[in-house]
Image (spheres, rainbow, N blue to C red):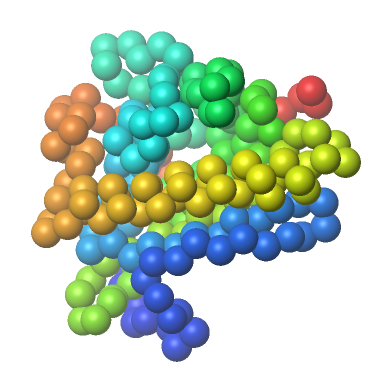
Amino acid sequence: MNATVTRPDNLDTADAIAFDRDGRDFVLRAQQWLPASPESIWRFVGDCRHMNHVIPPFMRFRILSPIPDGVPPAIAPGAIYEYKLRLHGVGFFWRTLMKEVEYPRRFRDVQAKGPYASFSHEHTFEAMDWAGVSGTLTRDIIRYRPPGGPLAPLINATMVRRDLQKLFERRHRRMAELFAEGGDPAAELFGDKFTRHLASESPQHAPDPPAA
């Protein structure tokens, strides 16, 4: 178990979404406090089926990866998940490669194949009190490059940033609903068929995906 810590002075809000630029990369930073332990949140977000419950319906998200016996493979370096989604009337294939895993503190996945020129998503979970209630501050950092080469900034401004904003607004709203009042969505939605997490807390890494 992680030790619970008090709220840092520089944390102004428990729910925030912000965008930035770092060289050629665009960066999304989001944070949300939830009244649940890091382990409980990991059980949910560490199961690829959770996306069916937090992604906006307009994206028509669908899992393509085989789920033998109804249990997706556990998050582990080198694990691959494949999906299909739809944006602006166009269908996309997406292959995610799990890169780094430190249960129950953080994991990072990257797009191995999909619509972006590059896409990396780091998830972190920090046990933290908020207004006297024990819980977890979840943080997401997405570094991405839209397609389009020199047109990438325009594509980001007109479509990608807006889509990511909607996605995280919906995600935060649904996560707050699912974890409200002691909710345990992994157990409630997946029953006994939930993904087993890694027992090791040691950092684990996978090699980078081959260049497209």
- Measured as percent of width and height from the top left, residue 173 is found at 30, 53
Q: Quadrant of residue 200?
A: top left
Q: Is residue 46 left or right of residue 93?
A: left
Q: In the image shown, does 88 or 101 lie closer to the viewer?
A: 88
Residue 172 seen from this side? yes
Q: In the image shown, does 38 or 184 lie closer to the viewer?
A: 184
Q: How many numbered discs? A: 0
Q: In the image shown, does 86 or 193 lie closer to the viewer?
A: 86
Location of the N terminus by quadrant is bottom left
- Measured as percent of width and height from the top left, residue 103 is found at 42, 49
Which residue is rendered at x = 30% and y = 41% of the image?
44
Identity of the residue furthest to the right in this view: 150
Q: In the image shown, does 95 or 146 lie closer to the viewer?
A: 146
- Measured as percent of width and height from the top left, residue 48 is found at 39, 30
Location of the C terminus by quadrant is top right
Q: Is residue 40 left or right of residue 149?
A: left
Which residue is rendered at x = 26% and y = 56% of the image?
176
